[in-house]
Amino acid sequence: MFIEVFFPKHRKREDRGAWKKLNGEKAMDPFTCLLITLLFVGVQSCPEVCRCVAKPKYERYVADCSYQDLQVVPQDFSSNTTTLTLSVNHIATLGEESFANLARLQGLWLSYNEIGTIAEGTFAVLVHLRALDLSHNQIMNFPWADLSNLTTLQLLKLSNNHLEKIPPEAFQSLKDLRSLWLSNNRLATLSDGTFSSMPKLAQLQINNNPFDCTCKIWWLDGWLQSTPVSIPEKKSVTCATPEKQKGLVLGRSLKLDCALPTVQLVYHSSLGDSKLKDGLTLQLHCNAVGKPPPKIRWKIQTVNQHVAIDGPNVEREEHLLLDPAGSVPSRGRFLVFKNGSMAVTKFSKDSEGIYTCQAYNDVGSREAFVHVALAGSEKPTTFLKNHLQANKNPNQSCDIKDDRTSEENVKFVYLTPTVPKTDCNGGTQRQLALGSLFLFCLLAHYS
């Protein structure tokens, strides 16, 4: 327990003298004594092993509990505490309740402990936190989602831990962060754009990590060459694997055989005149090349549903079909083949929409899309406009640029089904008819 006694600046001199006189008198009315205490004494709780100082002038309440051999976080702090130091102890676990009563914390220092377990929500309540130091611990799994609440954070120290992965969106909410310490961890790779959401970042420490210098890390090599962010010990940002890259310094133009995918979406049709009717089969083919060879994801967006299909599904006759909420799996008519082709059986009015082929590899991703509608359908301008607004800035990576806009790449294909044809033996030969009438082009691609 500590007591801070102070006089407000506006109190008169005679009041101060009266206080001194009353304080020296032996006989004092108990009620008067209590009243004066309530008026002039500020009481703040503090654990016995800690040193606490109140500084009302600066609205600061500092608690120092370092070097106390603590194994858990004490729970007797004043709710007004703004700075808490728990460094150089033996704390191994942080629970959701560890700082539940300290919502006003601005600085939290936990370096040189034995922290290996941190519960989700541990830091979520600390919305005013500006500095968080967790360096020199044993953290492998960090509650990254907690950072979304720490929008005022300026310093984050996670160096000298056991971190192996950092989610791409981990620092998305840290718009005010100035300094980030990630050195001396076990990071083999970092996702493209990991640091792009922090406009005020001035210092970044990522040295002494075992980076795997394959195409996954190519973006970082380029970013380190051009970023204005200060990178201390830059010569220690090196490759650990593969063997031929071991010891090379990132940010010095590593010679990697990598290429962002190029995508071409082609529409196949058989010509023939027929009257408009539903029930045809649509076929699209996606040509994609890159280093390493890209994988293909098909995405279909209609007014009533969104569909995402990763890889071929013909063997299993199944795919990932999402309802408008994006969560309910179902079966459907979308068939994807190993060669990158996709077929939509029984194409109907409900199947009209945006058909997108996305190619992605370790370097990044690119996509091509085409709008498909039945002949006679009105041009769905509203639906298309919304789609184009969402695709103003297609995914790009490294030093590859595409100056063309989405509006220049989208094409309309209007389909007219053909009727079944009869072969010379009298049998019926049903074609995978895609139609003969289209208003613009058959190709939509990013090259």
Image: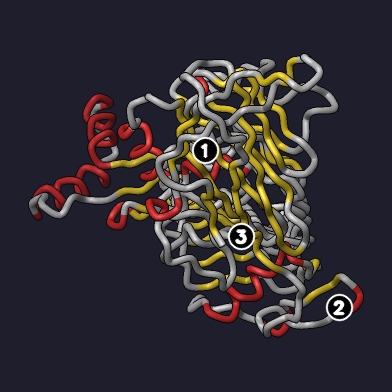
**Alpha carbon separation for disc pair 1 and 3:** 26 Å
**Alpha carbon separation for disc pair 2 and 1:** 39 Å
Q: Which callout, 1 or 3, points at the residue further toward the start of the chain?
A: 1
Residue drawn at the location 43% of the way across and 23% of the way down: 303
Q: Which residue is mark 2?
A: 246
- Which kind of residue does numbered mark 1 sit on? Ala
Q: Secondary structure at mark 1?
A: loop
Out of 437 and 130, give the one closest to the viewer.
437
- Which kind of residue does numbered mark 3 sit on? Asp
In the drawing, does residue 425 fall left or right of residue 226? Answer: right
Number of marks:
3
Residue drawn at the location 61% of the way across and 44% of the way down: 357
Q: Secondary structure at mark 3?
A: loop
- Give x and y (percent) for residue 98: 60, 36
Q: Which callout, 3 or 2, points at the residue further toward the start of the chain?
A: 3
Does residue 223 lie above or below 323 as drawn? Answer: below
Q: Which residue is mark 3?
A: 192
- Give x and y (percent) for residue 405: 40, 57
